[in-house]
Image (cartoon, rainbow, N blue to C red):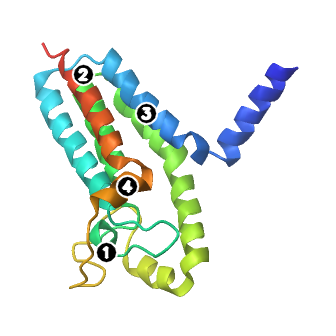
C-alpha cells in the first residue's frame, strides 16, 4: 500500500511539480554520461568547450541575480531572461557530445522538453507576480532562452559578485562538480 502511494505521489509530482526533480535529473544525467561515456577526441573537445561555456554562463548569471529582491536585467539578464537555463542547455549538450554515447543526445533533449518549458513558465509567472510592470517591459524585449544581440538597456552596468554567486546556490561549487565529471570523462579518451 505504501509503495502504491509512493509511486502515485511520485507520478503526481512529476506531472505537477516537476521543478522539484529538475536539478536531480540534470545531475544524474551528467554522472550517467560521464560514467558510461565512451569519449572520442573528435567529439570530446568540442563538447568540453560547450561544458566550459555553459559553466561560465551559469557563473556569470549567478553573480548578478538578487533573488526575490530585485529584477535582474543586467549582466546576462540584459540578453536573455533565463541565462542559467541557457548555461544548463549548453553544458548538457556539451556532456552529451563529449560522452560519445549515441543515446545521450536524445536523452538530454527528452529531459529538456520534459522539464524546461514548465520551469520557464513557472519562473516567469513568479517574476511577473513579484515585479509586475518592470517584468512585463523586460519580457517584451528579452526572450526566454535565445539571447538578444544588444543589451536590454544599453549602457546599464551591473556588478558581478563572487560572493553572490556562491550564496545564490553555491554556483562555484557546482562548477567544480561539473569540471570533476568532465575530467572523469576525459580519463576514458582513447
Q: Earlier in the sequence, mark 4 or mark 1?
A: 1
- Image coordinates of residue 84 in percent, x first then y, are 37, 55
User: In the rendering, which numbered label is found on residue 84?
Assistant: 4
Q: Quadrant of residue 180?
A: top left
| Distance between mark 3 and mark 1 Cα atoms | 28 Å
Circles 1, 2 touching at the beta carbon (< 8 Å): no
Task: Identify the residue at the far front of this view.
Answer: 163
Q: Residues within 10 Å of mark 4 (few under 14, many from 20)?
A: many
Q: Earlier in the sequence, mark 3 or mark 1?
A: 3
Quadrant of the frame with the N terminus: top right
User: In the rendering, which numbered label is found on residue 74?
Assistant: 1
Q: Secondary structure at mark 4?
A: helix
Q: Quadrant of residue 160?
A: bottom left
Q: Does the rendering let one see residue 110?
A: no
Q: Secondary structure at mark 1?
A: loop
Q: Earlier in the sequence, mark 2 or mark 3?
A: 3
Q: Residues within 10 Å of mark 2 (few under 14, many from 20)?
A: many
- Image coordinates of residue 47 in percent, x first then y, are 20, 35
| Distance between mark 4 and mark 3 Cα atoms | 15 Å
Instruction: Indicate whether 155 appears above or below 111.
Output: below
Residue topped by disc 3: 27
Is 74 on the left or on the right of 137, as rendered? left
Residue topped by disc 2: 185
Quadrant of the frame with the C terminus: top left
Instruction: Indicate whether 189 appears above or below 17.
Output: above
Q: Does the rendering let one see residue 156?
A: yes
Instruction: Indicate whether 140 appears above or below 4.
Output: below
| Distance between mark 2 and mark 3 Cα atoms | 14 Å
| Distance between mark 1 and mark 2 Cα atoms | 35 Å
- Image coordinates of residue 164 in percent, x first then y, are 36, 60
Amino acid at each position: 500500500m505504501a509503495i502504491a502511494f509512493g509511486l502515485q505521489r511520485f507520478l503526481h509530482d512529476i506531472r505537477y511539480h516537476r521543478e522539484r526533480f529538475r536539478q536531480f535529473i540534470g545531475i544524474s544525467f551528467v554522472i550517467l554520461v560521464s560514467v558510461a561515456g565512451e569519449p572520442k577526441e573528435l567529439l570530446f573537445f568540442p563538447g568540453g568547450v560547450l561544458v566550459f561555456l555553459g559553466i561560465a554562463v551559469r557563473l556569470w548569471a549567478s553573480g548578478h541575480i538578487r533573488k526575490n529582491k530585485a529584477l535582474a536585467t543586467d549582466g546576462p539578464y540584459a540578453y536573455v531572461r533565463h541565462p542559467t537555463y541557457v548555461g544548463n542547455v549548453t553544458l548538457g549538450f556539451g556532456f552529451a557530445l563529449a560522452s560519445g554515447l549515441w543515446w545521450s543526445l536524445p536523452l538530454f533533449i527528452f529531459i529538456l522538453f520534459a522539464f524546461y518549458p514548465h520551469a520557464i513558465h513557472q519562473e516567469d509567472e513568479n517574476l511577473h507576480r513579484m515585479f509586475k510592470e518592470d517584468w512585463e517591459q523586460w519580457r517584451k524585449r528579452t526572450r526566454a532562452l535565445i539571447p538578444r544581440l544588444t543589451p536590454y538597456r544599453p549602457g546599464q552596468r551591473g556588478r558581478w559578485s563572487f560572493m553572490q554567486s556562491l550564496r545564490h546556490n553555491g554556483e562555484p561549487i557546482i562548477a567544480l562538480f561539473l569540471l570533476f565529471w568532465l575530467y572523469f570523462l576525459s580519463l576514458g579518451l582513447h
